[in-house]
Amino acid sequence: MNYLELLLSFFQIGLLSFGGGMAALPLISQQVVDKHGWLTMGEFTDLITISEMTPGPIGINSSTFVGIRVAGIPGAVVAMVGYVIPAIVLVTLLARLYEKYRDMTYIQGTLRGLRPAIVALIAAAGVNILILALTGEGGAAFNFIGLGLFAAAFVVLRRWKPNPIYVMLGCGVLGGLLYPFTGGV
Amino acid sequence: MKEKNKYLTLFLSTMTLSAFTFGGGYVIVSLMKRKFVDELHWLEEDEMLDMTAIAQSCPGAVAVNAAILVGHRVAGFLGTLVSIIGTIIPPFVIIGIISFCYDAFRSNQIVAAVLKGMESGIAAVIADVTVNLAGSAWRESGAGAVVIMVLAFCASWFFDVNVLWIILTCGLYGFGRTWLTQRKGKGGTA
């Protein structure tokens, strides 16, 4: 039963995450956190952090991580298969169509309508993560360290455009130094 | 090139590319160009550009989609499977190892504090990505983009509308609008 649910969930994620990279975020959070409760919001955020710091797409990383948690290595394989099947079918299909017609007007038009929606959905998923960073699992008290780190990291990213890995590592180090003294964790 | 060698080269190239690509699909596409166009001469440069456009237009990870296309072009369906497996193995192994250590790690006080700090970092990264993407959506579609963004955000955040419906609705809207402009364009010239 778990296998079937994993397969179907990651099939949906693979089928609907248009726009690469972070576009999978809202879908994964909906399926994995809200619908099935396979991960808590905190674990999901850890997963995104890990994904950003290791090679490999978020979709693949999440199917591995979630699959293993729910049903071990076979679970990860099942989730992965669910995730890549839509890509195999659609990519091959689109490649055929493209060879035949050499015209992407409709696909690009469709994506043009989709792109703003994807931005909004990523933003909505991001707001949930921000709330978690500023409070804690289960609505703990507001923490100002979290807010300070967020603001500093955001300014650094906008201003100097460094590799996000360094920004996250920096926040991690500062968090490791500051939180233990405030009992914020 | 010998058949067997072709599959092995495809497998090893996609695996190496995937193992060393930090920073998402757009990075891997340029590395693929270097490998398959400049080094192995399996593809023309134009072909690679078309493949990039297709890989980005389909749902799923851009790296996986590009691997599917390259594999298919070089060695048919078996090539697709070989290059997908090559692309998947590195993240699978890395995340697999991390997930087995994760629970032990997570309960450590210091690690928990570090991860708590990183929550703020990842929230900032997502905010940064959102601002960049919103900017390009605005440049591409103007006020229409803003309307869709506001509506989609409200639907998802305030009203808990399933992501599936939001994506389908906006995709249909984009398709319908293209259809109307295409028809108008043809009507104008007739």
Image (spheres, coloured by chain):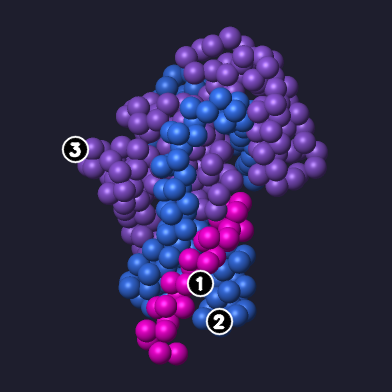
**Both labels 2 and 1 in a single chain:** yes
A108, above or below A23, in the image: below
Numbered range of the magenta stretch: B1-28
Q: Where residue B153 sits: x, y (%)?
A: 53, 27
Amino acid on which the number 3 mark rests in the picture: Met
Residue marked by disc 2? B40
Seen from the viewer's position, the closer of residues A166 and A13 is: A166
Residue marked by disc 3? A1
Q: Residue at x 62, y 79 (%)?
A: B38
In purple, which chain? A
In the rendered view, does B139 fall on the left or right side of B153? right
In the figure, what tint was chain B given? blue
Q: Secondary structure at mark 2?
A: loop
Magenta: main secondary structure: helix
**Residue B13 part of the magenta segment:** yes
Q: Where residue A166 sits: x, y (%)?
A: 70, 43
Amino acid on which the number 2 mark rests in the picture: Leu
Q: Are marks 3 and 1 in contact (CB under 8 Å)?
A: no
In the rendered view, does B132 fall on the left or right side of B24? right
Residue marked by disc 1? B13
Q: Residue at x 36, y 54 (%)?
A: A84
Separation of marks 2 and 1 at Cα, in angstroms: 10 Å
Chain to which the residue tagged by mark 1 belongs: B
Chain to which the residue tagged by mark 3 belongs: A
Separation of marks 2 and 3 at Cα, in angstroms: 45 Å
Seen from the viewer's position, the closer of residues B190 and A15 is: A15
Q: Where residue A96 sits: x, y (%)?
A: 38, 69
Q: Residue at x 54, y 41 (%)?
A: A50
For the question of whether residue B183 can be seen, the reply is no
